[in-house]
Image (spheres, grey):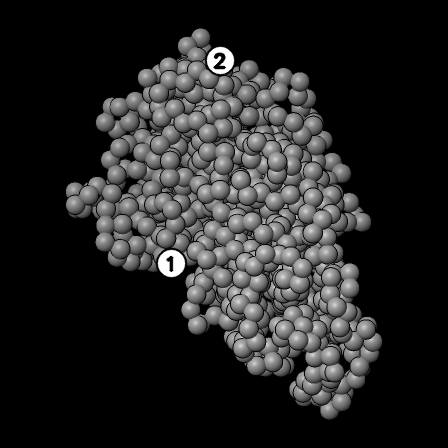
Amino acid sequence: MATVQFTYFTGLRRSFVNNVRLTGTWDSNGRYSDQWTSLPMQQITGEDGCPCFTATVNLDDSQIGQQFRWGVILDAPAGNNLWGIMTEENDLNSRERDRTFTLQAPSSEIQQESYYLTHCRRLGAQKSYNGAPQPGIQFAVWAPNARNVEVVFGQSSGYIADTGVGEDTSRPRLPLSRLGDGTWQTNGAAPLANFTAFDRLPYMFRVTKADGQVAYKTDIYSRCQMGKGRIDPSESAFSGDYRQLDGSVSCSVIIDPDTVTREPEEEFSPQQVFVPESEFWQNEFDPNRPVPRRVEDLVIYELHVGALGSGQNRPGNFEDAMSLLPYLIELGVNAIELLPLSEFRDEVNWGYETSHYFALEYSAGGRDQLKHFVRTCHRQGIAVIFDVVYNHYSPDAGRAEWAYDSDTPEQNIYYWYEGNSSNYPQPDGGYIDNYSTGFAPRFYEEIVRKMFISSAATLIEEFHVDGFRVDATASIHLYNVLHADGRRTDNVNVFGAKFLREWTRTMKLIRPEVMLMAEDHSDWDGVTEPVDNGGLGFDATWYSNFYHHLVGDAQGGTQYARLMTTVGYGGNEPLAMDYFAGALAASSDRKVVYHESHDEAGNSQNSRRTISAAVNSAPLIGETRRFAEARCRFACGMTMLAAGTPMFMMGEEIGAQRFYRYSDFLSNREDLLGERQGDGQRLFRFYQDIIRLRLEHSGLRSHNIDIIHVHNANRIIAFRRWDNSEELLVVASLNNSPFGSGYAIENSRLGNGTWREIFNSDAEPYGGNRIGNLGGSIASSNGQIYVVVPANGFVVFQRL
């Protein structure tokens, strides 16, 4: 008989699956069968210190050379009897998730077949457990084209030039051995037996590439990059302060993932005290302030940490974010969406140029400061959403993904390349463009897909983030074209969709309540359909058309209502309220809606802050500011009262005016705390109250919406919101004059009843004129109701 040992590795320290069973295409006699046979797997602790599951099967010698299929069935918080293989076959025409192997002739070693749910603790510098009383260390890297790989250690400067200058020669290089799947790893020699001896040492991989050239490469699975500044020595010698280095090119740093700094201070401080992770996360939640677990229940504040720190001669960091939390708690939001904070190029950056997906941007404070931020948010009932970028890498990835082990384009292992470079006039012709700022990743490589998946799993497990916003997902599953001539590459799209399904499927297995949002402009309903129904499995998509209809300064064309931009010119012409009504109705289909995001606050052509668009950038003084703030209240109100999940960009709540641009955001930062006490106090008060209204009324958090009245000439729209417990009516106007004597709305769905005004955007505390229904009750009769409606405002009623 030929013996095969199967192992299912989770790569996660937390034990979250049980009743794990191996199943495969063999029968009780060890011969191939189309009828799958199952048997229980035994839980053990793997060398990575994480739970894994193993089982052994004896197959008949007559089956040598036969291909078998196998998989794993398990129970988890997501459900029982779940298929435990998240990875689809590497086949354009298949979505099957079986593993395959060919039975080999018996040898001195048992045939091993393994599946890794994640690579969270497989590659990089990891703890290694082999029965010793303390963990050792193991280094591993994927470099299938390399001739040789060694680990080298850096000096205090934090940089090793390609000449070797900066290498700590007092520490011997560590050789790695090639494994069958293109990975290299250390062999567990005695010097590696004590992880603590290596903790927080700088290191790199010295890679002898396919052509024999030597390059010093960072660890793609690094948990920390040493630099936190702007200097890129461009592979030359560097002898300055490591804090001046661009982290994406500096040495990687060995980090113990199972400890956390007791105080939110710099991790490399010699005075820093570390505590076990389990101790740190004790008392993470306050039962009186539950963290929201449904996308529908969120009010999202989009926060760029780097844009904090007004008045400081540096980008913002987590210390600034922690200082802002009392302000956000007072504002009332219950979710903070962080612009990308995985390691990126330079220190002045929006974050959409990721170089290392497991490392946290050190200029922002690093990994442990993020943990302190998340824990503090959770104690206040605030969810943390993490923005991630998988459609491209950093454009300057020469010490990271680019040409990691070969300079031949078709062997550029992290990048998709079609065919051979000899087929194109220029060597870069085979790379894939996708309307992002870099070439597409090589999604047909399972290990590349698993890198992105594992980095997100790490953010869930080690950092306790509550959800994700995935950047530009249509660039992954739809927009891919050949760099040489712009031809569609549908095969790339297929594997991009395959990756996204694997990603959402894995996240939901690991943490069923995780909230997954896609920035997707394809208008494909499948983005939010379950993966088992052919969709991509996201909970919601960003709905940019809502913004274009409501504000519209970043997008021209008559296909959009562009309400705020149009009223900003000051005329009284009819508005395309009917166009906006369509977007408002569509918000019910699992959308995230917003009146401002990071892309449209000055960075996109013609875009600007909402308060500026509201009055066509006129000086915000006197009556002009009153008009501007009233229209801002309208814009915010439509977002908060829509049937999607509301979101707004930092600063909207105080009437931020300065352009928020990629190129100069640092010199245009707003003093949020100061403005909240100054000119922004009335708008801040409005935001507090409208957020509270949404969170207190379940009917406003449902997907139910019914547009009952639209009048373009009068600039009026009215709609109902409801659930099983309540019904609300919203009447909104962008008319420059109030309907002080009442405005007639007629619709049979109003029926007969009494409605009480519960909110008026024109209230005096907001700087309004107090034109409305004075909180009183009015009747609807035979589907008709007369409502006092303020200028550039709205009123909300509840049916009694």
Q: Position of residue 637 (x, y in %)?
A: 66, 65
Q: Is residue 430 left or right of residue 616?
A: left
Classify mark 2: helix, strand or loop: helix
Q: Quadrant of residue 395?
A: top left
Residue 125 rendering spot, x and y as whole percentages: 49, 26
Circle number at residue 722: none
**Residue at the disc numbered 1:** 478
What residue did someone put label 2 on? 191
Comparing 586 with 683, the one in front is 683
Most distant residue in the right direction: 776
Above or below residue 741? Residue 192 is: above
Amino acid carrying mark 2 in the image: Pro
Quarter of the image for residue 748 reads bottom right
78 up-or-down from 729: above or below: above
Mark closer to the observer (1, 2):
1
Location of the N terminus (image quadrant): top left
Q: Quadrant of residue 373?
A: top right
Residue extending farthest bottom: 782
Which of the two discs, 1 and 2, labels the residue nearer the N terminus? 2
Q: Is residue 465 left or right of residue 67?
A: right
- Of residue 320 and residue 436, the one placed in the foreground of this image is 320
**Which quadrant does the C terminus fall into?**
bottom right
Lateral position of residue 489 relative to residue 720, left or right: left
Residue at coordinates 29% horizontally, 58% vertically from top-left? 488
